Amino acid sequence: MSPAATVTRKRRSPLAPAYSAEHCFEVTARLHAKISNRVFDQAELASVLGISPGASTTDRLVSSLRQFGLVDKGDHGLTLTERASVLVAAKSSNDPSAFRVAALETVDSSPVFKELRESFGAKLPPSDALVSRLEKSGFTTRSAKQTASALRDSLRFAGVVDDDDNIIGDLDNLPEPVAVTSSEDSEITPIDQVDFSAIVASEGQVEVNLSHPRIDVPLEGGRVATVLYPPRLSRADVEKVYAVLDALIQS
């Protein structure tokens, strides 16, 4: 074969979730509410979520759902798994322990995520170190960054790391898992309704503990905007966030 006829194949990364277990849980909850145990295809999944069925991002989402054991693919299409039902039921039961166990089992359903989690010592490595490690395992730089982000978010969702990235060794006494609000009935709390009563002083700075650090806002066309409130917000921080949102509206 002449050099001109040589075909360069695109490098493929190892199979790993591109989306976090938290994101996949939210998708699963919506599918469970709309589709339940019926067989469905990617087009119906996309319709429920308000996304394009043929987009590469949708392909990666379906792949992530399958790797987490939340969706099965058979001869006739896709179905939600028993694990999906257990995870949704655990969340609905308001039993943090049951939800934590189900969430961690979901994360560990990905062999890549399980192997990495079990290899960590007392602390979750920094993002750059995770990316470098994944690249050495055959991931492209782009995929390594995406996988590292999905892994970090998944471990926080399962509650096995604390705010300082320390690995929780005692799995029987884990902190409360990340609260997930339903995209069906969530909305942004107006700034004049934000509760600043729980203000505490810390090293000369004013901090605020908001009861809902994450809010999913339903938009037209089935889209969802996610607002993440970082910990230890000051009033000035919240006002900056709302100023940005207001500027987007005015633009």
Image (tube, rainbow, N blue to C red):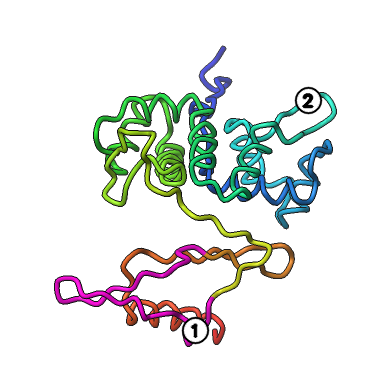
Give me the residue at 45% from left, 27% from top.
Answer: 112
Q: Is residue 114 above or below residue 92?
A: above
Q: Which mark is residue 193?
A: 1
The residue where tag 2 is placed is 74
* Apparent side of residue 180 relative to residue 173 in the rendered image (left or right): right
Residue 238, position as x, y percentages in the image: 39, 78
Looking at the image, which is closer to me, 230 or 77?
230
Segment tinted magenta in the rendering: 189-214
Amino acid type at image mark 2? Gly
Q: Do the CB atoms of the residues marked 1 and 2 lie less than 8 Å apart? A: no
Looking at the image, which is closer to me, 160 or 124?
160
Q: Quadrant of the N terminus?
A: top right
Looking at the image, which is closer to me, 110 or 128?
110
Looking at the image, which is closer to me, 144 or 97?
97
Residue 85, position as x, y percentages in the image: 68, 38
Q: Quadrant of the C terminus?
A: bottom right
- Residue 61 picture quarter: top right
